[in-house]
Image: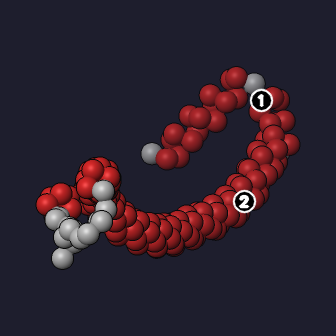
Amino acid sequence: MALTPLDIHNKEFTRGFRGYDEDDVNQFLDHVIKDYETILQEKKALKEEVDKLNEKLSHFSNIESTLNKSILVAQETAEEVTQNAKKEAKLIIREAEKNADRIINEALHKSRTIALEIEELKKQAKVFRTRLKMLVGAQLDLLENNDWEQLFETNVGEVETEEETEETSNA
């Protein structure tokens, strides 16, 4: 069991023949009591401080643990978000490629259709040109025909007689 200042104060020494000077011993004991009491108070204060620091340490250890868990969760979430973003990017790229292929195929189909239409229009233009040539040629032949010459040489009186003759023969 540890000594207390009261134990030191109440300590009685046995007296011997020519023992120690009682005043010196009492004075020394008073000094020891004061020092011992100061040390006990300091020990108590230090113990309280150690307890407070241990509480703070425990608190900060809990905070550290929580932060570590939070960091791990954040890292996992970041990895998950990154993976999801990559997956979504791949899906977007695939969809864009499908759309691009569809657009290209539609454009090729339209260009083929237009090319066929152009070819058909060229054929029609050639046919029209040939028919126009034939029509213009026929009209030129009519213009160059000798019937025009006869028309210019005929008199008005002769035409009426010919018309009457035709009417009588038709009747």
| 123 versus 153 height, above or below | below
Q: Position of residue 18 (x, y in %)?
A: 30, 65
Residue plotted at (60% across, 63% down):
107
Around disc 1, counting alpha carbons within 10 Å, would you say few (fewer than 14), some (14 to 19), or many (20 or more)?
Answer: few
Residue plotted at (82% across, 44% down):
140
From where the camera sits, is residue 163 visible?
A: yes
Answer with left or right where residue 59 lies relative to residue 106.
left
Determine contact: label 2, label 1, CB under 8 Å.
no
Quadrant of residue 119 within the rendered picture: bottom right
- Name the residue beneath numbered marker 1: 154
Q: Quadrant of the N terminus?
A: bottom left
Answer with left or right where residue 149 lies relative to residue 24.
right
- Residue positioned most to the front: 17
For the residue pair 112 and 60, the one nearer the viewer reads as 60
For the residue pair 106 and 130, the one nearer the viewer reads as 106
Q: How is the image coloured?
A: secondary structure
The amino acid type, in three-letter code, at marker 1 is Thr
- Name the residue beneath numbered marker 2: 122
The amino acid type, in three-letter code, at marker 2 is Lys
Q: Position of residue 85 (x, y in %)?
A: 46, 66
From where the camera sits, is residue 124 visible?
A: no
| 3 versus 134 height, above or below | below
Residue plotted at (58% across, 39% down):
165
